């Protein structure tokens, strides 16, 4: 009887704690990456394979901005209306006589070479007046091993690069933050089910997600678990900082693609802007903003400085979002994730891009 009472009390406490986390820390819904859901938020694709509302091909007198990019632009873990393209659309239309449509053409796992292929194959048909490329710093590494034939094949799929019925597959590149530290040496056939169980439970309970994230954070803060640059996936994620011999090739391939994109768009009188999204650990050295305690001393490249210099040299408008993130002093990313901005992160990015667009010259990143 006493055992039953204990169980009932614990169950009640769990329910109240679960409700408290859901009310006061809703970002922990972001740990759910089930099929057709991004961070617990259901999404859908329109008839063009885009995560956007339906709209007609003929644009009439509206000014169209096409936002291409990877999962950051797609808005992983955010509602469509909170993604920076849609926030930017609202900002542009406030008190304006011009009617603006900002199209979210972000795709999971994208990178500039692939996005250029998409623009030529599909995006140009949407008749954009301006293109914004949301550049995530892992783009330098993502395109290293891909060729044009692969990229052209990928853009034929719904949302260009992923099959709409298999969105769970995009978790794979982020396996570095999903392994249980205390089972890494157990046989794979035991470890893998435990990892799946961990993420299944966190996808359904905010409280368990909160507990897991804080335990993981403690392991990093105490040094019991350390971020490693030694695995292929980690090197690709950090390639923009120059920690690997492939960095030079990665940067060259990406920059060449951006130059080609600029020429292609300029020849059609279409404006072009590159918005550079920072990683979480660049914003601050505070543990809240450097969850994985990444050793920055190993970096030999400042990607923002390099992109700004590259933009000036090639007459490409580059918007560096990092300074505005640093001014905010707020948490701008989701738990266990240092590249996907939360709602506030997307809103700050949109305001930063908006300021650049209205100040810039029409031929160099303005509208």
Image (spheres, grey):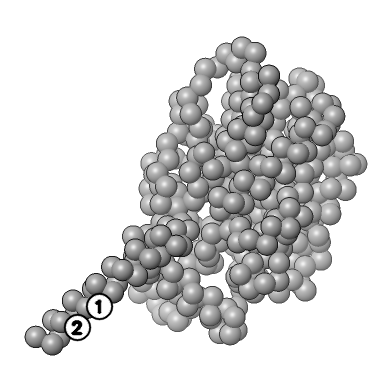
The label shown at residue 10 is 1
| CB contact under 8 Å: marks 2 and 1 | yes
Disc 2 is placed on an element classified as helix
Residue 227 in the image: x percent, y percent? 61, 74
Q: Nearer the viewer, residue 113 or 17?
A: 17
Residue positioned 85% across, 29% down in the render = 361
> Which image quadrant: the N terminus?
bottom left
Q: Dot 2: few (<14), some (14–19), or many (≥20) neighbours within 10 Å? A: few
- Identify the mark at residue 6; answer none if there is no mark: 2
Please report the residue visible at 44 percent of the width from the left and 69 percent of the height from the top: 210
Q: Nearer the viewer, residue 35 or 285?
A: 285
Residue 220: percent from left, percent from top:
57, 78
**Measuring 68% from the left and 19% from the top, which residue is drawn there?**
97
Cα separation, mark 2 vs mark 1, equals 6 Å
Query: Which residue is at the far left?
Result: 1
Where's residue 119, x and y in %?
Answer: 64, 29
Q: Residue at x 33, y 60 (%)?
A: 204
């Amino acid at each position: 009887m006493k055992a039953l009472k204990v169980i009932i009390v614990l169950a009640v406490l769990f329910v109240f704690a679960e409700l408290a986390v859901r009310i006061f820390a809703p970002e922990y819904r972001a740990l759910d990456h089930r099929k057709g859901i991004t961070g617990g938020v259901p999404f859908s694709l329109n008839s063009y394979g885009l995560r956007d509302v339906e709209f007609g091909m003929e644009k009439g007198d509206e000014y169209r901005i096409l936002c291409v990019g990877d999962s950051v632009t797609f808005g992983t873990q955010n509602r469509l209306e909170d993604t920076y393209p849609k926030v930017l659309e609202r900002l542009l239309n406030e008190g304006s006589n011009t009617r603006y449509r900002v199209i979210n053409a972000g795709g999971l796992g994208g990178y500039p070479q692939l996005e250029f292929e998409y623009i030529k194959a599909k995006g140009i048909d949407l008749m954009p007046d301006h293109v914004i490329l949301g550049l995530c710093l892992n783009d330098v590494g993502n395109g290293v091993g891909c060729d044009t034939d692969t990229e052209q094949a990928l853009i034929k799929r719904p949302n260009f690069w992923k099959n709409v019925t298999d969105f769970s597959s995009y978790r794979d590149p982020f396996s570095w933050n999903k392994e249980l530290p205390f089972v890494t040496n157990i046989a794979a056939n035991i470890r893998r089910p435990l990892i799946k169980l961990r993420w299944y439970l966190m996808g359904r309970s905010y409280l368990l997600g909160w507990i897991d994230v804080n335990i993981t954070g403690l392991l990093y803060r105490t040094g019991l678990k350390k971020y490693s640059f030694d695995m292929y996936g980690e090197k690709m994620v950090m390639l923009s900082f120059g920690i690997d011999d492939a960095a030079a090739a990665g940067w060259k391939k990406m920059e060449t693609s951006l130059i080609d994109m600029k020429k292609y768009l300029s020849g059609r009188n279409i404006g072009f802007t590159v918005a550079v999204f920072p990683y979480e650990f660049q914003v601050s050295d505070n543990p809240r903003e450097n969850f994985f305690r990444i050793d920055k001393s190993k970096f030999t490249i400042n990607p923002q400085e390099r992109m700004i210099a590259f933009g000036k040299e090639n007459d490409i408008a580059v918007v560096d979002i990092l300074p505005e993130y640093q001014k905010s002093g707020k948490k701008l990313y989701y738990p266990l994730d240092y590249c996907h901005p939360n709602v506030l992160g997307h809103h700050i990015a949109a305001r930063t891009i908006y300021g650049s667009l209205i100040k810039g010259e029409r031929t160099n990143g303005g509208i």
